[in-house]
Amino acid sequence: MKNMYVGIDLAINGPHHATVYDPQKEQYLDKSFSFDISFEGFEYLLGQVQRHVSEKEEYSLNFVMEPTGLAWMPLSCYLKPRGHRVYRVTTQLSSDFRKFQSKYAKSDRIDCRSLDKLPIVSKDKVYHGECI
C-alpha cells in the first residue's frame, strides 16, 4: 500500500497551502499549491493529491496540520469521513522542526514541507485530528 503525507499550512483569512510527500520515494511529488477555505477548495486539494495515485493502486492519505485556531476543523471534518487520516501537531513541535530543516528562512512552502514529515520522524508527538 502506498502511503502519502500531505502537509497543510492553514491560514485564517487567506488560502491554505499544501505539499505532498511520498516517503517510499523520499521526495515531494509537486511544488506547494494553495486551495480555498471552502468545499470546492477541499475538493481541489483532494484532487491534487489523488492525481499522484493510479486507479488500481491501494493508498493511504495522511494529512498533517498545525491547528491554527479552529481553521483545522472544517478540513478535518471533510477528510475523516472520506477515510483519510488527519494529524495535528503542536505549534512548538512544528516551529522547532521547521527551524531544524531551514533555520534562516520561513515561507508557506517550508512550513508545509516540515509538517508532512513530522508523523514519519516523530510519530509519538503528533495526535489525531478528531471531528466533533
Image (cartoon, grey):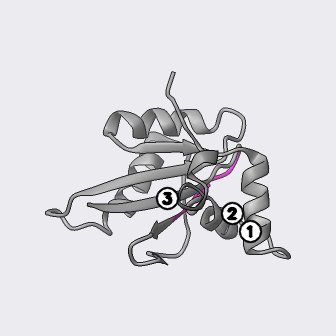
Q: Element at badge 1?
A: loop
**Disc 2 from disc 3: Cα separation:** 11 Å
User: In front here: 127 or 70?
Assistant: 127
User: In front here: 82 or 89?
Assistant: 89
Q: Element at badge 3?
A: strand
Nearer mark to the viewer, of 3 and 1:
3
Residue located farthest toward the left when viewing the structure as drawn: 56
User: Circles 1 and 2: CB distance less than 8 Å?
Assistant: yes
User: In front here: 32 or 60?
Assistant: 60
Residue occupied by mark 3? 6
Residue located farthest toward the top when viewing the structure as drawn: 132
Residue type at mark 3: give it.
Answer: Val
Q: Element at badge 2?
A: helix
Question: Residue 62: x and y, percent?
Answer: 44, 52
Structural crowding at the residue carrying mark 2, measured as other residues with C-alpha within 10 Å and reported as few (<14), some (14–19) or many (≥20): many
Asked if residue 11 is positioned above or below residue 32 in the image, the reply reads above
Residue type at mark 2: give it.
Answer: Asp
Asked if residue 2 is positioned above or below residue 88 in the image, the reply reads below
Question: For residue 9, what is the image quadrant?
Answer: bottom right
Specify which label sits upstream in the sequence, 2 or 3: 3
Residue found at x 60% / y 49%: 65
